[in-house]
Amino acid sequence: MFELFLPMLERLGIIVTVAFIITRFKFFRELIDRKTLNVEQQYMAIAFFGLFGIIGTYTGITYDTNSLEFGRWAYDLGESEAIANSRVIGIVAAGLFGGYRIGAGAGLIAGLHRFSLGGFTGFACGVSAVVAGIIAGFFHKKDQPLKLKTALLVGGLAETIQMFIILAVSRPFTRAWELVQEIGVPMIAANGVGAALFLLIIRNVLNEEEKAGALQAQKALKLAESTIAYLRKGLTADSAQKACQIIYEKVDVSAISMTNQETILAHVGQADDHHKPGETILTNATRQVIHKGEMVVAKHEDINCQHPKCPLGAAVIAPLKRRNEVVGTLKFYVHSEKEISNVLLELIQGLSALLGQQLEIAEAEKAQELAREAEVKALQAQVNPHFLFNSLNVIVSLTRSEPKRARSLLIALSKFFRQNLGATTKTWTTLEEELRHVKSYLLIEETRFVDKLHVSYEIDDSALDAKIAPLTLQPLVENCIKHGINDQQSEAEITIRIEGVEEGVKIAVMDNGSGIDRDRLKGLGASKVDSTKGTGLGLYNVNKRLEHMHGEKAKLHIESQPGHGTTISFLIPHNEEEVSA
């Protein structure tokens, strides 16, 4: 009994080879991932596992029940001979991975083959092969990973049932009983261990590939992170060239290329002397990827390169998608199709997906910037009529009493709005221009207040080249006049202070007016305020524009006490970049 056990374990070495080979097949990967196979894949799985069972039969050890001796490898059998084999391992694997249909199909193929070899257990072994596949199929769990102990149990159980079938069917019974006594325990143990070993090898091979895939995913993430600064500008010739250069330095391929829907945007690596940016796409495979949105492996003849010494023998072409629309392609070129591995395919697939997401982010950021600019323009437009109505009221009041003053004021107003219209078409201006604009406004307001209004300027000339949102100071000064000193009986004072500080440029508008109540002060500038004294719209608009264009630190800071005036200040941080409208 025990002299058979070790030889059978030795011959299980075939399992290692078969297990490794089977992981190369797509249908088996589908089985491992618990996916439903199509009809073609099912037949392929049945044929493969059936062949595995046949190999297990041929690698078995013959046993002569007359001489009680173990012999050669099994090719054909005499009437008194039987085989101690590992056929059941392939059949059990078929049932465990694919269900009872694939298990029974593989068992039928292996069983018919065993029956054809003859021997007094031929029929019993043929039937037991089918039964083993059906039994293993009942242990198939589509939504749960397969465990080693399950494979060990089912492998031993299938072989145990085979022993019972041999006893029930094979004749003479005494010979069958002697056979089972001799080979039963070794075969049950060896095939149970073999089934578990088969699963273990497959699991380890797939785990190694998963680790390799994880490394490629990590590499793809790093590459995407390195290229994000460029692709955020969109898919252009410049951004594609810089992204391809980064990828080429990190990936072991012959060349990297990017295209849009019509032309080559960039090509880095070998054959850059004739694969040039700006040329129209000639590769049919590239057009197929753009049309279908699926990755393609292009052979040498599919590249359509007319250059006689082109070193690029094959390519992997992946789509670059933005919102599920193909906007271009990413290409990995190699010398030959043999260099295209599963690892390379996973890398380009993951990288193209990440680059596509970057393009989506770029589009979203551009849309957000356009929306922000539109909101800024809308806020600026709200400020202009506010001042216009006030100015027209002054002109109307002077038309009868002082027509010459009204005329000069109207001329000043036209100059002011000419400058105002220029401001609404720009996103940024300088503090110097903004201060000039405020001075024009105050000339008009001084006409209304005659000698009642006094304005002083404390200006750091070195800070006047700082960038600022247009129409920012004028609403603040207007707020001082309208709400701070409009009803003041004594001389009204407004001070405009601009000074350079360590954090940037600080601007303050101060008045000596009546001040602001503490309750009203809380929400002023942060939102529109319902009040009989005004809505706070001017301050709200200015505050929103400062926040949008200069950041949180630039928000308005309002200090006021009833009867002691008001100070409105804000900070323009250093290094503000002008945004093109």
Image (cartoon, rainbow, N blue to C red):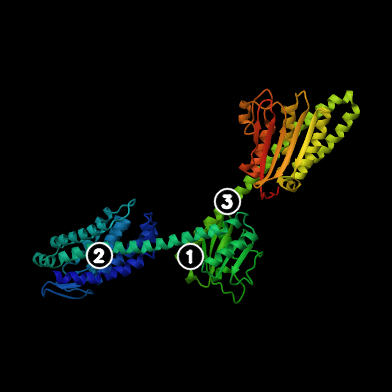
In this rendering, does residue 388 appear at all? yes
Q: Can residue 81 be seen in this view?
A: no
Q: In which quarter of the image is residue 332?
A: bottom right
Q: In this view, does 529 lie above or below 84?
A: above
What residue is pinned by disc 3? 360
Label 2–label 1 contact, CB within 8 A: no
Tell me which label, 1 or 3, sits earlier in the chain.
1
- Residue 330 is situated, as x and y percent measured from the top left of the image, at 56, 61
Name the secondary structure under disc 2. helix
The numbered dot on residue 194 is: 2
Q: How crowded is mark 3: few (under 14 residues within 10 Å), some or many (20 or more)?
A: some
Is 407 rendered above or below residue 74? above
Which residue is drawn at the image coordinates 64% and 71% (left, top)?
274
Looking at the image, tell me whether mark 2 or mark 1 is earlier in sequence order.
2
In which quadrant is the N terminus drawn?
A: bottom left
Relative to the observer, which residue lies in front, 338 or 388? 388
Q: What residue type is labelled 2?
A: Gly
Q: Which of marks 2 and 3 is nearer the N terminus?
A: 2
Q: Give the CA distance from mark 1 to mark 3.
A: 24 Å
Q: Do the residues labelled 1 and 3 touch (CB within 8 Å)?
A: no
* Left or right of residue 403, residue 184 in this image: left
Taking depth in this image into account, of 198 and 532 the one nearest to the observer is: 532
Q: Measuring 61% from the left and 62% from the top, which residue is drawn there? A: 242
Q: In this view, does 344 lie above or below 492?
A: below
Which residue is tagged 1?
344
When asked about the image quadrant of residue 535, the answer is top right
Q: Position of residue 517 (x, y in %)?
A: 64, 25
Front-lying residue, 428 or 272: 428
Q: Position of residue 104 (x, y in %)?
A: 28, 58
